[in-house]
Image: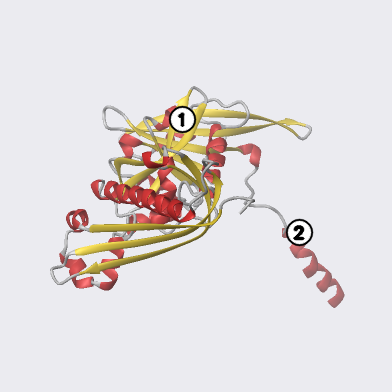
Amino acid sequence: MRKILIVMVGMIPILLTGCWDQRLLVNRTLVNGISFDVTKEGKIKSSVRALNIQSKGGGQFEIQDELVSSVRPTVVGLGLDFNSKIAGELDASKAHVVMIGEELAKKGIHPFVEVFYRNTDSYMSSKIVISKGKAKEILAMEIKKSPIAFVILQMLNEAEAETVIPKENIFWVWKSILDPGIDFILPYLERTEANKVEVAGVALFNGDQYTGTTISRDKSNLLLGLMDQLSRAITMSIILGPENNSRSISFATNDLRRNQEVLVDQNNKITCKINLKMNVVMKNYPQDLKKELNIKKLNQDLSDELTKQAKEIANTLQQANCDALGIGRRISSFHPELWKKMNWDEEYKKVQMEPIVRVNIMKTGNVF
């Protein structure tokens, strides 16, 4: 009797085994890209790019890439509209890219980030980008080789690797919005041709609102360097001044170190000093072979040009009221009483910025 009882108990897990909560792929429509725009009437227009997978039997499937749009006064209810327009169970758990049109982003992106952050099925690694013009115009692009959302995701990953844009996702953006002592930047996409889109640079934010100001792609990596987010091995290109016959030069950073100081004097005047030191390896420089290369002068020329660009970037940040350097966070941490009584949006514009870039050429090529 005891042996029979043991056998029956051992069979219970086998009999109960089953995928009671399974979600079959063929019953779902996978959202891979979402866009948000504002209409002329001030309503929210959202579009989703989704993959509808249908079984044809025999282990074969047919995949259809759909584009569906809906308009609502607010973001609430858009999901219900999409469910009624798309066959199958709508699944946004792998929405790789969330695009927000620039006009809507100026009003604030908090409501659209919150939709994903509070949903347990959301994909917290989704990328958030700002588009020039309407975001739907980019999401609606037809690319033969792959759905447009996957193409954009690949572009963003490559731009992150090149340190052209910051490494960001929904979770990172949500945390940044909740931090009053620092502002964030997001990738800025632009449609250049009928079937072409590019990462044009980064969009500057004040709080959760897009300021309408961008930093171009050729200078965004220097901004990331000032933010201490620059990779240790990237390639940069600049054009030296007329005294160097306006020659272009490209180099790779071999080592980079940033030091930031935020000082407050007795009159509560705030100064932000940033020293950016980089050891570089020359990649390309059209040298006059009749003259010996003056490394010391070239170091100084590069330092002067990059310092000039750094000051221009700092000025742009202040004009846009974007504290991407986290100066406010330093004030709130080390001068909490001052922070409590000041209006940071007003005081930030008065901060004296002093960025300095120093370049040290370690190698000019295979010869040296």
> On the rendered structure, is 41 left or right of 68?
left
- Name the secondary structure under disc 2: helix
- Residue toward you, 309 or 229: 309
Number of labelled discs?
2
- Name the amino acid, label 2: Leu
Quarter of the image with the C terminus is bottom right
- Name the amino acid, label 1: Ile
Quarter of the image with the N terminus is bottom right
- Residue toward you, 351 or 28: 351
- 111 lies above or below 345: above
- Name the secondary structure under disc 1: helix
> Which of the two labelled residues, at mark 1 and mark 2, occupies the earlier sequence position?
2
Q: Position of residue 95 (x, y in %)?
A: 52, 42
Q: Position of residue 151 (x, y in %)?
A: 56, 36
| Residue at the outermost front position | 290
The residue carrying pointer 1 sits among few (fewer than 14), some (14 to 19) or many (20 or more) residues within 10 Å by Cα, namely many
- 317 lies above or below 135: below
- Residue toward you, 118 or 263: 263
Tell me which colouring the rendered structure shows. Answer: secondary structure
Q: Residue at x 61, y 32 (%)?
A: 146
Residue 186 visible in the displayed image: yes
* Mark drawn on residue 138: 1
Q: Residue at x 46, y 47 (%)?
A: 165
> On the rendered structure, is 95 left or right of 43?
right
Between marks 1 and 2, how big is the CA–CA gap?
51 Å
According to the picture, the residue beneath numbered tag 2 turns out to be 15
The residue carrying pointer 2 sits among few (fewer than 14), some (14 to 19) or many (20 or more) residues within 10 Å by Cα, namely few
